[in-house]
Image: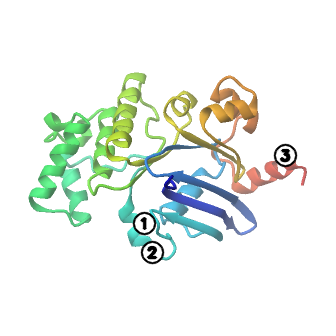
Amino acid sequence: MEKPKFEIEVKDLVKKFGDITAVDDISFTVQEGEIFAFLGPNGAGKTTAIKMLTTLLKPTSGKILVNGFDPTKDPYNVRCSFGIVFQDPSLDEELTAYENLQFHGVLYGITGEKLKNEIKKLLNLVELWDRRNEFVKNYSGGMKRRLEIARCLIHDPKILFLDEPTLGLDPQTRNHIWSYIKKLSDERQMTIFFTTHYMDEAERVAEKIAIIDYGKIKVQGSPQELLSQTKTKTLEEAFLKLTGKEIRDDKSSAADRMRTAKRAWGR
């Protein structure tokens, strides 16, 4: 039997900021075409890990391969391999939907008829073709999110990173967003790496899940494997059992979070 291809390989990854260890010796793999959820409370290390995967931060130590390329040695090919939807809005609202995709395509060296065809295909995918000439500032939150997904696909990436893609959206729009994402995974064998605080989404959509807290991966596996390992009935119960029920202050300093972690680990 042919071995599965890993689109993302992380081994013994560490990121330190001075005395603070934000990512602490984590390892995981994501197979080609897999939908992978990376979950954790605020300040757990998710964003730092994603920044290393997407060339925005250099690791302190450890190994990363994204589509077979090392982000520290070959950032250009890594960047060509993925599309990303950030948690915060990143569209130019003074441009139309069509112009946003056009500008992004040119940045990746796509021009002419190829770019026109790709824009039409993607705007049809996210059901925005009929609204292509409207300024983005007049779009709803859900429409903007759909446009961001279309934009990050313009260069036909192999991997799609999604940082809380449905944050603040109503249930109907959330369901539509995930239907587009699952279609991409099925039709293009695209690898999806996402974060979310909606546990029901992760449980329903993800084929594999890793839960990180205080920089360490606590558990990973399929949703059913996580429920079995934690002896819980839902992913939310498993998540709370592993990470605790205390409210995490998103504005707390890394030092405060690390002191809390050391107390929790008895160090």
* Label annotation for residue 74: 2
Label 2 residue SS: loop
* Label annotation for residue 78: 1
| In this rendering, position of residue 52 left or right of residue 259 | left
* Label annotation for residue 264: 3
At a point 35% along the width and 64% down the height, the residue shown is 80
At a point 74% along the width and 57% down the height, the residue shown is 255
**How many numbered tags mark residues here?**
3
Sequence-first tag of 1 and 3: 1
The Cα atoms of the two marked residues, 1 and 2, are separated by 7 Å
- In the image, residue 26 lies at what x, y percent? 67, 57
Here the colouring is rainbow
> Between tags 1 and 3, which lies in front?
1
- In the image, residue 246 lies at what x, y percent? 75, 34
Q: To which quarter of the image does residue 131 belong?
A: top left
The kind of residue on which mark 2 rests is Asp
At a point 72% along the width and 50% down the height, the residue shown is 214
- Near mark 3 (Cα within 10 A), the count class, few <14, some 14-19 or many ≥20, is few
The kind of residue on which mark 1 rests is Val
| In this rendering, position of residue 116 left or right of residue 155 | left
